[in-house]
Image (cartoon, grey):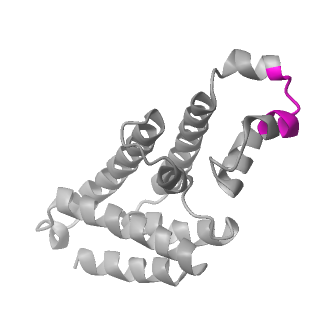
Amino acid sequence: MKTTDELFYSQGYHQTGINQIIEESGVAKATFYSHFKSKEDLGLEYLRAKKNHEMNATQDMVNGIKDPYKKYMAIIKGLIPFMEESNFRGCGFSNIAVEITEPKSPIRKEVKFHDEVFRSLIRDVVQELVYSDKRYKHLNVEEIVDMYYIITEGALIASRNYNDTWPLKKAVIALEKLIQ
């Protein structure tokens, strides 16, 4: 799966062929097809593994922070080094969603499922913030979750497009203002 992850993420889903994956991974063609019936099946497994890895890492990071405000800010702030380390390639889910245009595609459904899991994580963090201090009691959790998600997604795409972290740094400011 490591080879698939590297190729789909760096080259894109459509630019990566099954033969290239088989060749670079060193897996026999028969073995590959005994595990994956199609490129779409491989794409789904790629997304599921990526979701599990990213969500576990984000959850672990958030769980390691006691202060609810710092926890709220940690998700967006954590994306700055991620973008730099990925050479501004961006979110693997957004990248593949751009390539797969059919809304009913299983791959697009998996992207949406990832987004819902991400939004659930944000919801937990926002709820904890709201319940932590009377300063935040007035906040509408679902509204904040929606805006946090949209700001984050937009900042990731803009950061990729500009090949710079300034959009994420502006998103940090926007998310701070969102809860004031």
Along the line of sight, the residue nearer the viewer: 139 or 102: 102
Report the magenta stretch's main SS: helix
Residue 113, image quadrant = top left
Residue 99 is left or right of residue 149, and the answer is right
Judged left or right of residue 52, residue 88 is right
Q: Which of the 4 image quarters holds residue 36? A: top right
* Quarter of the picture holding the C terminus: bottom left
On the image, the x and y values in percent for residue 28 come to 86, 23
- Residue 25, by quadrant, is top right
Q: Is residue 69 visible?
A: no
Above or below residue 34? Residue 147 is: below
- Quarter of the picture containing the N terminus is top right
Camera-nearest residue between 13 and 67? 13
- Whether residue 95 is situated above or below residue 2 in the rendered picture: below
Residue at position x 37%, y 83% in the image: 173
Residue 45 x %, y %:
59, 32
Residue 39 in view, yes or no: yes
User: Where residue 112 sits: x, y (%)?
Assistant: 38, 44
Where residue 129 appears, x then y in whole percent?
Answer: 27, 62
Q: State how many labels appear.
A: 0
Find the magenta span and give its range.
21-29
Q: Nearer the viewer, residue 8 or 144?
A: 8
